[in-house]
Amino acid sequence: MEKMQRLGIFIFDNVELLDFAGPLEVFSVVGEIIGKSELEVITVSEKEIPIKTIHGLSVSADLSLDPLESLDYLVIPGGDGSKQVIQNEGLMNSLENLILKSEWTMTVCSGARIPAKLGLLADKPFCTHASVYEDLKTMEPTGIPRPDQRFVQSDKKLFTAAGISAGIDLALYLTARTFGKSVAEKTAEYMEYPMNYQ
């Protein structure tokens, strides 16, 4: 029997709600379709205390990053809080470890600040929120902005999405890539969401 795969969604204070809730919905539905024994979807945060989203919703993560050695898949959302995340050296070290060990990592919106700060977008194409491209070009001058795209593959194991709702498109694309097109189609059908991932 194959081991259960684990997908982690990183959350933090002042995270943009739909940045993580959109992919969370997609991958939770995927888990229902393929079987919860095949895919575990969890939220992770720096500490075992509730975080508050950018609009004030309080959310408790399933796990803290401390004991977490690896994840099969990692989702990094954005929001104003990403500015504080990249200033936290210990937290960035933990995230870098997870990114390097994961089969793939996807960022949504200004979550692209994290790989940019880690040097992972050097000479690579990237997407982010329309209002964040200038900031990312300052952080990583050699990065190649793609404001014409909803999402791009930035590197072999790194994918970046544009603002907020684009995270759903990328999550569906990665569902098709990882779990099969039929699973992605069933997920999109359940969510009544257009198939923008193709």
Image: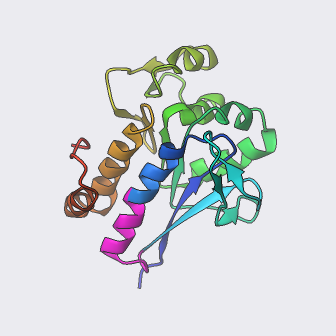
Q: Residue at x 44, y 19 (%)?
A: 144
The residue drawn where x is 33% and y is 56% is 175
Residue 23 vertical position relative to residue 198 in the rendered view, above or below: below
Numbered range of the magenta stretch:
26-38
Q: Position of residue 195 (x, y in %)?
A: 21, 46
Q: Main secondary structure of the magenta part?
A: helix
Q: Position of residue 72 (x, y in %)?
A: 51, 61
The residue at the far bottom in this view is 1
Residue 50, magenta (yes or no): no
- Is 135 above or below relative to 121? above
Residue 93 drawn above or below residue 86: below
Q: Is 42 situated left or right of 83 in this image?
A: left
Q: Quadrant of the N terminus?
A: bottom left
Vertical relation: 143 (above or below) 36: above
Looking at this view, name the residue that lies furthest to the front: 56
Magenta stretch contains residue 31: yes
Give 61 or 127, whichever is nearer the viewer: 61
Residue at 32% x, 27% y is: 149
Q: Say which quarter of the image contains residue 28.
A: bottom left
The residue at the point 54 percent across, 14 percent down is: 134
Q: Quadrant of the C terminus?
A: top left
Residue 11 position in % (x across, y down): 62, 50
Color scheme of the displayed model: rainbow
Left or right: 174, with 112 as reference point: left
Between 110 and 101, which is closer to the camera in this rendering?
110
Residue 15 image point, x, y percent:
61, 42
Image mark count = 0
Q: Please indicate whether residue 153 sits to the left or right of residue 79 in the image.
A: left
